[in-house]
Image: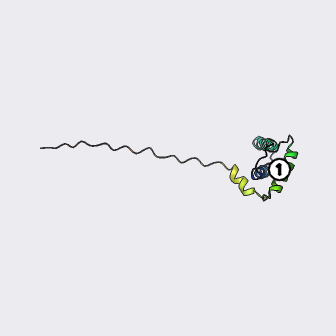
Amino acid sequence: MLMAHPSMLRTLVARYEELTASGAEADAKVVRQREDTAYTLCVSTGTRDVRDALRVARQAISAAGEPASVTAKVKAATAPAAAPATSAAPAATPTKASATATV
């Protein structure tokens, strides 16, 4: 079975813990994000239960010697992306002016 990279697992574990700790059970968006994160953890670890997924992920993180703290990385990874800069319209192509002589 393929296993996700420990740094990815670390990010998922931190994200799941953050969403669980928020206690926003009434907020449908937070509940959905937590469910999505739990699903991704399960798929990434080959498990069917989020508790098993967390255990397997933590073992993989520990075995790889990954640092435990990822709060800053999680916040950066889940922050909304900045809108891409729009480029100005292309400059007009100069045209060759015809020379006219006046007499």
Looking at this view, is 21 or 39 the one in front? 39
Residue 26 in view in this figure: no
Horizontal side, residue 21 vs residue 76: left or right: right
The location of residue 3, given as percent across then percent down, is 79, 46
- Would you identify the image quadrant in which residue 61 lies? bottom right
The quarter of the picture where the N terminus appears is top right
Question: How far across and down, in percent of the image, does residue 87 sit?
Answer: 49, 46
Viewer-proximal residue among 86 and 23 = 86
Q: What percent of the width, then of the height, locates residue 58? A: 84, 52
Q: Identify the image quadrant of the C terminus.
A: top left
| Visual colour scheme | rainbow
Could you tell me residue 51's position as x and y percent?
87, 46
Residue located 85% across and 42% down the image: 47
Label 1 sits on residue: 57
Q: Amino acid at mark 1?
A: Ala
Q: Is residue 66 left or right of residue 76?
A: right
Compared to residue 81, the image places residue 72 above or below, namely below
- Given residues 11 and 63, the one toward you in this image is 63
Say which residue appears at 60% left-offset and 49% top-offset. 82
